[in-house]
Amino acid sequence: MAVAVSLAVIAAAVVLGVRWMQDRPTVAPAPPTTAEVTPSGELSPAQLAEYDQRLITTLRSKGLAIENPRMTARDAHLLCARLQGGQSVEQAKRDYAQVIQGDVTVAEVFVSTVMAIYPSCP
């Protein structure tokens, strides 16, 4: 008899606990935010857009086909952040060559152009 009462109490506690959990309000998590990586925290958005456009124009003048200018500018911003963080220029070139599937010449042109265009890109 004591076992049956104990089981009944446990069952009631489980039902009430589940019901209590279902009635609790839930808070939706905040949407993830992404920080825009820029070659310099000192550049205004207008200045950054000007440097980005200069980068695209210069890369095209050097014979590179730019299919997605926005992504190319983003890659430049990431490259500058890595260089500012201490990555060597040679490692940056190797990494970018891997990203673009092994074209070392294009990687060298890209990295050197990015470094020449953005004022605080080492």
Image (cartoon, grey):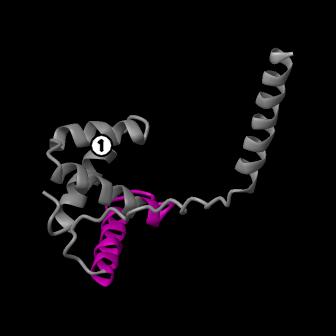
The x, y position of residue 96, in whole percent, is 33, 43
User: Residue furthest toward the front?
Assistant: 1
What amino acid type should be assigned to the residue bearing mark 1?
A: Thr
Q: Secondary structure at mark 1?
A: helix
Q: Is residue 38 magenta?
A: no
60 vs 116, nearest the viewer: 116
Question: What's the magenta bit mostly, secondary-structure-wise?
Answer: helix
Look at the picture and state if 76 lies above or below 56.
above
99 vs 11, nearest the viewer: 11
Q: Residue at x 32, y 84 (%)?
A: 46
Q: Residue at x 42, y 42 (%)?
A: 100
| Magenta residues, start to end | 45-71
33 vs 112, nearest the viewer: 33
In the image, taking residue 83 as reference, residue 38 lies left or right, namely right
The image quarter containing residue 34 is: bottom left
In the image, taking residue 75 as reference, residue 14 lies left or right, namely right
Q: Residues within 10 Å of mark 1 (few under 14, many from 20)?
A: few
Numbered disc total: 1
Q: Which residue is tagged 1? A: 105
Figure quadrant of the N terminus: top right
The x, y position of residue 40, in whole percent, is 21, 68
User: Residue furthest toward the bottom?
Assistant: 46
The image quarter containing residue 118 is: bottom left
Q: Is residue 70 magenta?
A: yes
Q: Residue at x 43, y 36 (%)?
A: 101
The x, y position of residue 62, in whole percent, is 31, 60
